Structure formats: C-alpha cells, structure tokens
Amino acid sequence: MVESWSFPDTAESNFRPLVVIELAKGTKEETIEWFTKRIVDKKADGGAQLLIQPLVTENGVENIYLVGASHLRLLLGAETVGLVKECNDNSMRTFTYSSRKTFKHFADDNHNFLTMAECQYIIKHELENLRAKNEKMIPGYPQAKLYPGKSIVRRLLTSGILVQIFPLHDREELKKLSHSWYGRVKVGYQPLDDIRCYFGETIALYFGFLEYFTFALVPMAVIGIPYYVFAWEDYDKYMMFATFNLLWSTVILEVWKRMCAILTYRWGTLLMKRQFEEPRPGFHGVLGINPVTGREEPVYSSIKRQLRIYLVSLPFVCLCLYFSLYVMMIYFDLEQWALDYHKENESNFSSLMLYVPSIIYAVVIEIMNRIYRYAAEFLTSWENHRLESSYQNHLILKVLVFNFLNCFASLFYIAFVLFDMKLLRQSLATLLITSQILNQFAESLLPYWLQRRYNRRMKKRMCSKKTDTDLSLAEQVNMEKEMGTYLGTFDDYLELFLQFGYVSLFSCVYPLAAVFAVLNNITEIYSDALKMCRVYKRPFAEPTASIGVWQLAFETMSVISVVTNCILIGMSPEVDALFPDSKMDLVLTVALVEHLLLAIKFIMAFVIPDKPRDIQMKLAKLEFESLEALKQQVRAFQMQL
Amino acid sequence: MVESWSFPDTAESNFRPLVVIELAKGTKEETIEWFTKRIVDKKADGGAQLLIQPLVTENGVENIYLVGASHLRLLLGAETVGLVKECNDNSMRTFTYSSRKTFKHFADDNHNFLTMAECQYIIKHELENLRAKNEKMIPGYPQAKLYPGKSIVRRLLTSGILVQIFPLHDREELKKLSHSWYGRVKVGYQPLDDIRCYFGETIALYFGFLEYFTFALVPMAVIGIPYYVFAWEDYDKYMMFATFNLLWSTVILEVWKRMCAILTYRWGTLLMKRQFEEPRPGFHGVLGINPVTGREEPVYSSIKRQLRIYLVSLPFVCLCLYFSLYVMMIYFDLEQWALDYHKENESNFSSLMLYVPSIIYAVVIEIMNRIYRYAAEFLTSWENHRLESSYQNHLILKVLVFNFLNCFASLFYIAFVLFDMKLLRQSLATLLITSQILNQFAESLLPYWLQRRYNRRMKKRMCSKKTDTDLSLAEQVNMEKEMGTYLGTFDDYLELFLQFGYVSLFSCVYPLAAVFAVLNNITEIYSDALKMCRVYKRPFAEPTASIGVWQLAFETMSVISVVTNCILIGMSPEVDALFPDSKMDLVLTVALVEHLLLAIKFIMAFVIPDKPRDIQMKLAKLEFESLEALKQQVRAFQMQL
C-alpha cells in the first residue's frame, strides 16, 4: 500500500503532512488516544487544533504520525508566534490575521503565503505549547508526572514515550534548492533567501556569515600570496601586512553587523518580538511557584547550581586545561626527537618526518576537542540551568576557553617562549591544514558516505529503483527518520572561530594562512550545504536576528590578535635592528603602537553604526507608527470622556 | 491688588498656577488672543485644553500668563506622556486613565496623586505639542512662518515673541525640601525621593550620582591618608594603592549602574517608553517631507552638516587644542622662572612663589574651558543637528576632548616627558584644589550672592518685609522670572568627570587627591543644593533612566587611568631597582601587568550584571504580563472566528 503526495485516501483531501511524530514502540493505546485527542482538540478546549494522521506502511501502523494543519489554523498560528512579513507597501510588519489583506502575496487561496519552514515552525510551536490542564500524569504512565501548564510534548520527550519530532523534507523543493546551491559549479552568491525559506533564519544566517567571511578573507589572502611567491622576509612588509590585517578584521566584524541587519530585516526576524523563555526541557527540580509568571513549575536553587559550577565544573575545566598543556609538552618532546632524527640521518624521509609530530598533534587536538565537547555538554546539562540561553552561554564559555587553549597554546609557546619563528610557521601551517582536512572529513564527507550507504541498502530492501523525488510518503518518512539530527550551528561557528584565530593571531608570521582559510571555506560552503541537504533530517526553522554570542567571540579574538601581532613584530630581528642603541625604546614603541591600534579599533567599533541608515530609517518609521497608533488610541479614548 | 495662594478671584476656584509664560513686551493683541485660545481650546479642536490666566500686578497686565489644568486633564496628560506609577500591588506600571483605580494613593479627589513636578512636566509636554493646523504664520507676525504640525511654542520662542516658559516654585514645599536637604548639619543621605518629586529625575539622579561617587571615593581617601601622614614613599605601597584604585574604580562604575537601576525603577523612569524625538527647536532648513513620519518639516542636507563638522568644527577644535598646548608651554616657562627665582633667593616668599605658576595656570585653564564651552555650543548649534540627542553628543564630544587635554596635558607632559614626580605631585595638587575652589565660587556662591542682592533690592522696592513663603503670587512670579535659568546637569557632570581624572589618572603618585575630592564633593552637595533651591528658576522635570553618555565617559577615563598608573609605577626608581639586570624585563613586566588589569576590568564589567536580580525579576514579570495580555487578545480574537 503505497501513498503518493496527492493523498487521495486521507480524511481531508487538503491534508498536507508537515511534521512527523515518532512514538516509542509499544506505547500504550490509551496514551496515544489521549495525545492525539489533545492535538486535534479545539483551542478553546485547550487543544492545539491541528490535524494528525497515522502513517500506514506495508508493515501496518508503526506508531508514526503525520501532523498538519488547515490553512486558517496556520495563519492564526503565524500571528501567535509573531511572524513578520512584507506588506504591500514594501515595509515589514508583524502579521495579524485581521490585517492579512495588506500583506504581499496574500490571498485566501494562496497556500504558499507561509513557507513550508514557517508552517513547520508554527506547528512545532503549537505542539510545544500544548499544556497539561488538570492531568496529574501522562495516561498509562503514572511515573511521567504532569502539572497544570507543563508542556505535554516536553514531558513525553523526557520520559521517552515520544522518540522524536521532525519536519518533513520537501523533495521537490530540496532538489531545486540543492541544484541552485551546490548542484552546479558556478561563481556567485549562495541563494540565501531560498536557504532561509527552506531551513530557516539561523541556518541561512550561518551560511550568510560563512560566505561573507570568505569574501572578507580574500583581500588578506591576495595580499598574503606575494609574501609566499617572492619569499619576502622583510619585517617592514610583514608589519604592513599585520597592520592592514588588524584594521581589516575590525572593519569586517563591524560591517558584518550591518550585513546581518540587512538580511534579518528582509527576513523579518530583526523586528520579531522576543518570546518569553520557557524552562528548557531537561530542567528539573521540586515543584514550586515561579515568581515571574506566578505559575507552578520546577524550581531549582540557584545556590546549588552555583556550587555545581564552581566546585565541579570549574575544577574539571582547569584539569582539562592542564591535561591539554601536558599533551602539548609531549608534542614538543616528539618535535625535538624528530629534529634529532633529521640531524642524524639527513634524508628525504627524515625531512618529511619533521612534519609528523605536528600532524599527530593536530589529530590529537581534534580528538581532545571532540571528547571535551561531550564532557562540557554533560556537565552543563548537569548544572541544571533553567533557561536554554543560560545553558548555551555556559556551554559556549566552557568550550571556547578549552578550544582556544588547546589549539593555540602550542603556538603561543613556540612564539613567546621558544622564539622560534620557523617552527611557528611550520607548526601553524600543519595545524591549520590538518584541522581543516579533518573537519571536512568528519563533519560532512563521512556522514554523507554513511548516509548514502544506508540509503542504498534501504532502497535495495524496498526493491525499488525510484529516484528520491519518486519515493512514496511512507518510504520517505522511514528514510528520513533514520537520518542523523543536525545539532545546530554551534560546531560550524566554532570551526570558523578557530580558523579566524589561526589566520589573525599570527598573521604577520604566516600570511599564507588566509589563503588556506579561503580555500577551505569555499569547499566548506559546498560540504556544509551537502550535509544540510543530504545527510541530516530537516531541522526546524529557528528565527534569529543575529549570530549572537559569536559576534562577541570574534571581536575578542581580534583584540587578542592585536596584542600577539604587535609582540611578534617587536621580536623580529629587522625591527630590532631599527633600535640598535636601546631595547627599551623598541619595547616602548611596540607598546605605544599596540595601544594606538587598540584605541583605533575601539573608536572604529564605536563610530561605525551597527545598522545601515536605510534600515535605521525603516525601524524609526515603524516605531513612529506604533507610537502614533498608541497616541490615537489614547486620544480616541479621551474624547469619549 | 495682591493675590494670595487661595485665588478667590480666579475664574475657576480650583485653578492652581503651575507654569508661567512670559510674552515679550508689546506683543500684538491678536497674537495673544490666538495663542491663549489655542491653549484653552478642546483637544478635539487641536487645542491643549489647559487653563490660562493673565497675571495681574500693581502695574496692571504685564504679558505674563499663568497656566494650569483641571485634575482630569492632568491625569489624561499623564497617560499621554506615559508616566509610570506604583500600583496597589507594589509593581510599577504605565499609568492609564482607565486603570487609574489600581494605582497606589489614587483617589478622584486626591490632587496629590501626581506630584507638582509631574504636573508641570505634563503641561510643558502639552504646550510643546500644541501644533499649527493650517496657520501659515503666527497671527500678527508674518515673518514667523508656520506649517501644519509645527510646534507653536517652539516657533514663538525662536521668533522671540515668547520670552520664557518656566514652572513655578512651590515655596511651601521648597522650604521643607531645603530644610531636609541642606538646612541642618546632619550625617546621612540626601532626600533623593523628595528631590525627585520636586526637581524631576534628571536632577535627582545627578545628586544621587554625586552622593554615590562621594561615598565611593571614601575608601580611596581613607587608604590615601596614611601615605601622607607617614610620608610613605615606597613604591610597593604605591603599587598596592594603585592596583586597589584601578579595580575599585571599575567596581564603583559597575555598581552605579545597579544603583541607578534601583533608583529609576522606583521612580518609574526605567520602564518609561522613549518618546519619539522631534527636531530640536533651533533646527532650520528648507521645508520638505520627513521620510520617517511622512510629515512636512524642515529638511537639512546631511552632507552640508558633515562639511560643516569636518571643514569648520574639526579644524577649530584642533586649533583650540594647539592653543591649549601653547599656553601649557608658557606655564612651563613660568614654572622654570619661579624655580630659578627660588634658587637665587632662597626665602619663604620664594618658596611660596613656586606655587604661583600652577595657580595662575589653573585659573587660565578654567577660563579657557569656559570660553571654549561657549564656542563649542555656538559651533554645534551652527552644525544644525536635527535631533537634540545628536546635538548633545556632538557638544559633549567636543567639550570632553578639549577639557581632557586642557586639564591633563601638563600633567602628562610632566609625568612622561619631564619624568619629574615631585613637580607632578605639586602641580596635580595645585590644579585640583584651585579648580575646585574656583568652581565652587563661580557655580554656586557667586550666583547665590548676586541673587540675594537682587532679591533684597526687589523686596525693598516692594516695601515688604515678608518672608519668602508669604510673598503674593504676583511678587513671587516677578521675582522668579528674573532668576537665572539652570542649564542642565552638563557642567556638573563635567566637573565630576575632571575630578575623577585628577583622582584616578595619577593616583599612585598623589594618593591624597581622593581626600580633596571627598571634601570638595561634600561641600559640592550643599552648594549645588543651594544653587538649585535658591539661585535658579525651578527647572522642568526631565524623566531619565540613566546618566547616559557620562557612564561611558567615566569608564573610558578609568581605562586610561590603568595605562597611566602602570607606566608611572614602571618608571619609579624602586620598581626599577627590582630589575637591576635588564630594563627590558621591567618594561615587559609592566606591560604584562597592564594587560592583565585591563583584561580583569573588561571581564568584571562583563560579569557584574547591570541590574540587580530583583529588578531583573520585576522587569521580567512585567514583560511576561504584557506578552500574556497580547496572547489573550490574539486568542480572544481567534475564538470569535
């Protein structure tokens, strides 16, 4: 029994499956009945007022359900989540059902007014906001407690009854998108607006940043090439390069904010009101009263959390940092050994051996980063943060500090303790290139290969020779539910952040780093695109107005790079030679230049407006209108008196 | 014909005069008629719906008018300006007339629900928002052009027909306030809430900051005293002092943000919505369409303004800076001359003469600062900024840069070019003390003395021996209209800013600076209070949620002081002696310490939350409630469908 996309056999002929819910095998019948009833119940009765259908496959019902919604329901949901859409007069406004006629491309029969990603986001929001009324527990599972206002879906997830919820791919759209994105070799921008329509704003913004950052690195790369080609070793040339680099990195980070404002204004997320933040799913505690909402919800003492952070997490992080430094020392022993070996047996093989310790170290760094990542996640989740944002901040801080030290400690040691510029250059190049190759492999190619193998096996089992777009709905769902889950843009940004470190921290010693970064990023765009389209389940769209804490992280890195580059230049023999009489004058000059550069950086960051003038004007206009509307209301009310 | 506070002869028996309008002598009758009609006209007819009465004195009508409003009108006005008041449940909420019953101390017959300062602020707001309908000019003055939407009061002011608008003092309240504020010698806090009720938030916040800053300086002063008493000259002790000083100054600036949030939350201004900013009164240009509001208003090309800024203002400021440096060089010549004189005739007189150049220089600095201030105001107003905030920012930037250089250039020169710590200490002390004495004299005592003399003459002329509170209304208005106008907190903050510079920039050389600052600030509180209560006209209350750009200015100063103090310590012979072998190591150590301190500063600023936890909770609660209310609205609307 194979279904097709036209669903002739569905209850409502216009039922379009948007989201898949997979329940655990053997879930009790009464639980399923209660859950599906709550999903289809009217809003007035505390339901989500969505449509739901079981997925019927050859093997019968498999506890997989498809969720959809009527067009009207989706429009009302768009108002609830506060979507911002473009109006007929080209301004962006918060969508409301009553003003729907004023929006561009709106028509009562145009079911494409909301993109599929938006529909799926609305359904996710409605499902997550399906709350317990007076149920004390999930029917059939007395151990899965509920209290009034608790999100049912979150409780089902934490108690393992609900295996997963994920949005369906749209094979047709995906094919079009992947063709225009990475399907053909072309020079040009990515189809960011299409990516945003399909994957949502967070992911589109990541690809926007990746692209922007790659373009921004091109000038550095172009200026860096002659240093390699002509083997320029004069430090005055390096100094010029470093100065350009430092100012440039400030400019690109400031300009990105403007770019970001342009993109997110067009996408409507710049204007979207922040939703009130619920406790994160994993948060647990004794039931108490939330002082802000006045509602019953788990409460966990802030002191206990602080104790966990300072008595367990902090020592653990310090231990990890110590271990990382210890591994670094082993690397230097290896390096010494390779050098001795090369001296003893001067051969091609031995000179190749010189690179081996760095390569091994780079691999070890990558492995340590990944293991630490899991530990950090475990610890941060054990710290039991109430809000997802607080959890994310603690996780990012932990990971950033460790990754920074793990990746760059050896380079700092070589530069500022060993004073060995040749080794620094060699080590930097090996670390950068090895980590890039490893990342590309581990993040995209390996999962892609695994996924492909799995798909082929699946298809063979189904004995069908159909292409992806011809798959039946049941086949599609079964294939997608086994795909990996995309865990968010964290790792992708982290990779870019470390790359930015390699490029900027020691740029005056190794100008070629920018070239490698550009080359890597071009392939990264393709492999990340491949990963999003072919390897992972479709992720839920996540509205966002900026790259958040990463902006701060990149800015901090660019401040640190001012300091390192100034010291490196000051240590060079050529600059040294300029001050033959007094080392003091040298150091003082370097310190002066460094302070000047830092001052210029801060002034530049202050002077360059975060939003372009026309976006500022549009925002001012909206603000003015809402103030005027408020004034009108007050006036109308006062006139009645 | 003398009126008393009970106004038995006013048209409405409950007319309470709040604001005084003084028109130019000889203003045409038709203009007065039109203007007063517009003021009393109903809101629906585009009027301000206020009450107005001419002031009748012995000499007959003098073109002075008293403006008041009915209780209901004031309550509606409070809603229009978006006042935030305390509710019965102790939360702060935006006042609306329809929800008036839920507010604390509200009763239909309680005319003290709004403070007098709030009433005056509302009347000012309503007067300024009295806009031209289809008048093309002010009747009787064809050269005073109007266009639809132009503020009538602003046009009357710029064309000189309206001399001034100012709020009346409340002699009774003022007496009470001044008694509890500075009337008796006492140890304790200022009555900030009373000050706020009488003078408004901006001024209360200034006094709050002044008090806080004085308390914050006390630990520095206490630690500084033994350095003077025991004549400690060890640099390790100075180093400790400087380190404490630097971290302390970061802490106090961060903690002030929290204090400020507590104060402004209590006063309601933290929650007050920003009003849409109108063009400033002095702004002129060709009539055009404002792209934001779509209204007709003067438009002035941004390029022309930029040209004025970069081709005229910037060179002028540079010239002034050069001139200031030139004067500094003359001071050093004088200093040299005094030194030579002292060497030749070793006497008490000659050693006294050593201080004379510094004193002269301090006086010259003060004079230059004041002259430059006028020039900066003239230039900035000539730059023709559209918004008051933009005008203020340009003015503050101009003034800060010049004052910083003018006050501190000589100290920097002595410290880092002449390396003369003894002269630095002497010069710092003379500059600080002289400028404090001059400021106290010029800002408060001189105006007070002039005002007192004038008052005595006035009273003599009126042949009355009554005390202030017994004055008739006409006498009171006539006396107040001649009082000086308080031009805002700019100069007061600037004085504190420069004082902070003297205390922190070279604190490790002259720990006693904090002691003088504390002593000065204690008298400053009294003299500023005297100035507000006795010397100036009552200023209009101005709601504000923070000290604005001054926070940034103080933070910048504290960053600069880290750099200067580190260098000073590094230059000291004692620290020098710790590194007998290598001056390099010394400089590197100093640089390292400096970077560490700066890093600690930034991390501290980042880690300390800007608002205390309970204020955060209250704000979150309000946000939650407004989101819930919105959701309810959407839901109610959706259920109708």
Image (cartoon, coloured by chain):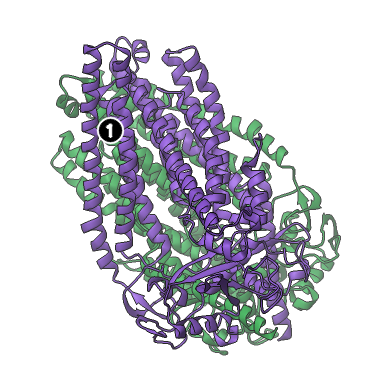
Chain colours: A green, B purple
- The answer to which of B348 and B593 lies nearer the viewer is B348
Amino acid marked by disc 1? Leu
Considering only vertical position in the picture, is B588 above or below B54? above
- The answer to which of A546 and B446 lies nearer the viewer is B446
Name the residue located 56 percent from the left edge and 40 percent from the top edge: B526
* x and y, in percent, of residue A323 in the image: 51, 27
In the displayed image of the protein, which residue is found farthest to the front?
A: B463
Considering only vertical position in the picture, is B542 above or below A285? below
Q: Residues within 10 Å of mark 1 (few under 14, many from 20)?
A: few
Instruction: Specify the subunit that label 1 lies on.
Output: A
Name the residue located 76 percent from the left edge and 73 percent from the top edge: A47
B126 relative position to A449: left or right: right
Question: Which quadrant holds the N terminus of chain B?
Answer: bottom right
Q: Identify the residue under disc 1.
A: A592
Q: Quadrant of residue A557?
A: top left
Name the residue located 59 percent from the left edge and 45 percent from the top edge: B258
Q: Secondary structure at mark 1?
A: helix
- The answer to which of A71 and B399 lies nearer the viewer is B399
Name the residue located 53 percent from the left edge and 63 percent from the top edge: B478
Task: Tally the numbered discs.
Answer: 1
In the displayed image of the protein, which residue is found farthest to the left?
A: A230
* x and y, in percent, of residue A60 in the image: 72, 72
* x and y, in percent, of residue A266 in the image: 44, 71
Considering only vertical position in the picture, is A564 above or below A441? above
